[in-house]
Amino acid sequence: MSDLIIGANNRAAVGTLVECTTRLVTLAKVDGTTAAAVGSSYKLNEVPRLMRLSMIYNQGREMVKHSEITQKTGTTIYFAAPHSS
């Protein structure tokens, strides 16, 4: 699972990555809340390949460039059903 935590006044953001089997939690500082900022965060590549085969994300607008993240990391991205995060 992955999500974006946005700080006060949208000035800071932290991406969260949770590997569901082992519960490994990885945090990534993101320079903004835009799709470009989220897409430029390469923290996912630091997680072992077997632990990042796929990722589930909420349907936020920051993931509009999800195909670029898949290209850069090799991780397939799925989206949770609306209102089921």
Image (cartoon, rainbow, N blue to C red):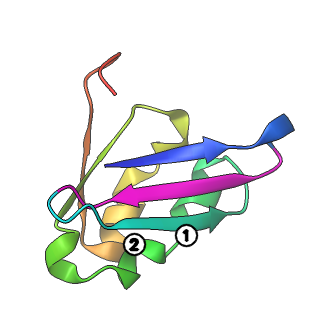
Q: Position of residue 26 (x, y in %)?
A: 44, 68
Q: SS at mark 1?
A: loop
Front residue of 25/56: it is 25
> Which range is magenta?
11-20
Q: Quadrant of residue 40?
A: bottom right
Seen at 32% across and 79% down, the residue is 47
Q: Amino acid at mark 2?
A: Leu
When the figure is inspected, residue 5 is found, relative to residue 60, above or below; the finding is: below
Say if mark 1 contacts mark 2, CB within 8 Å: yes
Q: CA distance from mark 1 to mark 2?
A: 8 Å
Seen at 16% across and 67% down, the residue is 53
Crowd band around label 2 with a 10 angstrom C-alpha radius: few (<14), some (14–19), many (20+)? many
> Which residue matches tag 1?
41
Q: Amino acid at mark 1?
A: Ser
Q: Position of residue 66 (x, y in %)?
A: 39, 52
> Which residue matches tag 2?
44
Front residue of 74/85: it is 85
